[in-house]
Amino acid sequence: MITVVLADDQPLIRAGLRALLHFEPDIEVVGEAADGRRAVELAAASKPDIVLMDVRMPEMDGIEATRRIAENPRLDGVRVVILTTFELDEYVFKSLRAGASGFLVKDTEPAMLLQAIRVVAEGEALLTPGVTRRLIDEYAAKVTDDRPTPELDVLTDREREVVALVAAGMSNQEIAERMVVSPATAKTHVSRAMIKLGARDRAQLVVIAFESGLVTPRKRRIPQGE
């Protein structure tokens, strides 16, 4: 059974999500929060598999709530999926840096939302190649804070290559084809890199690749007349 906490300041949104999830035999809603602070409290109390987290909420926004959940070692098994009205790359990047495992907009089809919950519950990141590439192009270059640079010396050359390919938005299948190995071998390399770098999931590998300088953003090409 996949346990879920719903965090959104709009009662109607929470009611709709609860109604959708109620009919899934493998998913159970174990709590609801109308603000980020309560979402953190519920995550600590019930340790759900997934928190569906809105970005804009009172008391504490969803990004700060995500950060507090991700930084709590007792909540290592809790995964956050950001669910918001605003499809902005800046929110995506901030969410991933805070520790989110995925990002969906609220007009997502119900079937896709259900699939996302199951994918993230299995330990995968909900990060499409298109989103990853936009992050590289638009927002990675804007990281200017003084966070410690992740050390990549613990990785083998092969693992560094794999992390770079993950950050380029490639799936395990695409990585396998590029490196001429089996998908299982590619997945093993990704898993080992995650363990060595202390990454919660695939999404965090992307962030580490940016912050370490392993991957540098491409400059955006400006079409003529823009």
Image (cartoon, grey):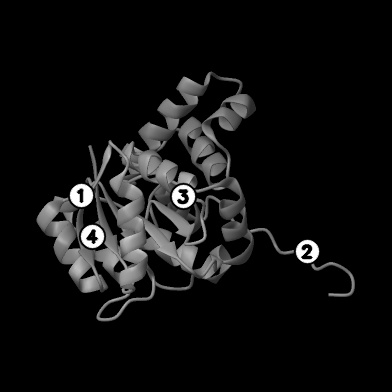
Q: Kindly give the residue lying farthest to the left in the view shown.
A: 45
Residue under pointer 3: 110
Residue under pointer 2: 221
The answer to whether residue 60 is left or right of residue 217 is left
Disc 2 from disc 1: Cα separation? 43 Å
Tag 3: amino acid: Pro
Residue 164, image x and y in percent?
54, 43
Numbered disc 3: secondary structure: helix
Residue at 46%, 21% (x, y): give it. 184
Residue 202, image x and y in percent?
42, 43
- Disc nearest the viewer among 2 and 1: 1
Disc 4 from disc 1: Cα separation? 11 Å
Q: Quadrant of the N terminus?
A: top left
Mark 4 or mark 3, earlier in chain? 4
Tag 4: amino acid: Ile
In the image shown, does 181 or 24 lie closer to the viewer? 24
Residue under pointer 4: 69
The answer to whether residue 107 is left or right of residue 67 is right
Residue 43, image x and y in percent?
18, 58
Mark 2 or mark 1, earlier in chain? 1
Numbered disc 4: secondary structure: helix
Numbered disc 1: secondary structure: loop
> Does residue 213 show up?
yes
- Disc nearest the viewer among 1 and 3: 3
Q: How many marks?
A: 4
